[in-house]
Amino acid sequence: MASDSKQRKYLTVYIHYNGLFAPKPLVYLNVVVSICDVDFGAMDLKEFVLFIAKLNEGSYDNVYYCTTNKPLAEFIRRIENDADYFEFIETGYSDEVGLCT
């Protein structure tokens, strides 16, 4: 039987904040924090926003995501409610590049 640490997989989430969007191609220039040891699937949107606000010592009106290896201009998505947050989690787990153990 595999150990719990080998069975448990968390998303690698890169939090980008305090930056600017630059066009052609669309990119976001900013500070980046990488998180690999938090079970975001156990949170709802409100808990997630509070977590990143505490982490970055700020508050956020809007939260967006884009999957790994996808152009920002085509795949950026706003997380407005718990259904969007669930989609973010599901998308992250379907993207094998975004998983860590």
Image (cartoon, rainbow, N blue to C red):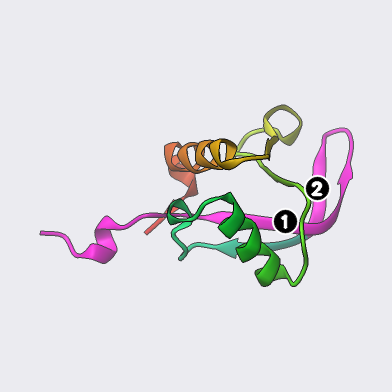
Q: Amino acid at mark 1?
A: His
Q: Which mark is residue 28?
A: 2
- Earlier in the chain: of badge 1 and badge 2, it is 1
- Asked which quadrant contains residue 5, the reply is bottom left
Residue 95, horizontal then vertical, whole percent = 47, 39
Quarter of the picture containing the C terminus is: bottom left
- Crowding at label 2, few (<14), some or many (≥20) Cα neighbours within 10 Å? some
Q: Is residue 80 left or right of residue 91?
A: right
At x 70% / y 33%, what residue is drawn? Answer: 71
Q: Is residue 25 left or right of residue 79?
A: right
Q: Amino acid at mark 2?
A: Tyr
Do tag 1 and tag 2 residues touch (Cβ < 8 Å)? Answer: yes
Quarter of the picture containing the N terminus is: bottom left
Q: Is residue 101 left or right of residue 55?
A: left
Q: Is residue 61 left or right of residue 76?
A: right
The residue to which callout 1 is attached is 16
Start-end of magenta stretch: 1-30
Residue ranking furthest to the left: 1
The one nearer the camera, 5 or 77, is 77
Q: Up-down: is 58 above or below 9?
A: below
Q: Describe the element under mark 2 as helix, strand or loop.
A: strand
CA gap between label 1 and label 2 equals 8 Å
Q: Describe the element under mark 1 as helix, strand or loop.
A: strand
Residue ranking furthest to the top: 74
Residue 13, horizontal then vertical, whole percent = 56, 55
